[in-house]
Image: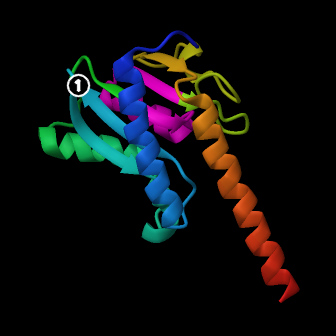
Amino acid sequence: MCNEFSTDDFYWMKQAFQQADIAATEGEVPVGAVLVSNGHLLGVGRNQLIGSHDPTAHAEVLAIQNACRQLKNYRLPKDATLYVTLEPCTMCVGALIHARIHRVVFATPEPKAGALMSARKLLEDGYYNHKFEFQCGCMREECSLQLSNFFKMRREQKKLEKEA
């Protein structure tokens, strides 16, 4: 689960963090993801739910879609790793299972909706025909702070709107 991380893990998580930064500037919850195979970037994604009017436009799903379009295949390579700044939800874990991801590295747990180790532990249920490895904690402090700052700013904006 929460193990040591390689230099490559930090490199790719920084790329996911940059996607999360872009999402925040677009008014989206700052979650970013990158999909990598054999040291090559296959796909990127960032939350785009609000702007696209699509509840499925999570960073993980968009990174998978981006990669699969480039590969012209709905299955990912056997060594594919997804780096994402927040623990995936149930929907995203389902997409990762169907795409046959090999490994997921996420920065920070999601206590309310995380589906790997927090609110749910879906891979432990034994219902799925595919399981993947996962690790948490790579750039945890930075990604957690990014999310906290975003929600703090959003609360302050709502407070100002009420006062106006």
- Give the residue at the far right of this rendering: 163
Name above or below for residue 2 compared with residue 120.
above
Residue 138 vs 144, above or below: the answer is above
Residue 77: give x, y in percent of width and height. Answer: 21, 23
Quadrant in the rendering for residue 86: top right
* Quadrant position of residue 83: top left
Place of residue 91 in the rendered image (x, y in percent of width and height, measured from the top left): 51, 41
What residue is rendered at 49% in x and 61% in y? 49
Looking at the figure, which quarter contains the C terminus?
Answer: bottom right
Q: Is residue 16 visible?
A: yes
- For the question of whether residue 56 can be seen, the reply is no
Which residue does the numbered mark 1 point to in the structure image? 37
Q: Position of residue 142 (x, y in %)?
A: 59, 37
> In the image, what residue type sits under mark 1?
Ser
Q: Which residues are magenta?
A: 83-106
Q: Could you say whether the residue bearing mark 1 is in a helix, strand or loop?
A: strand
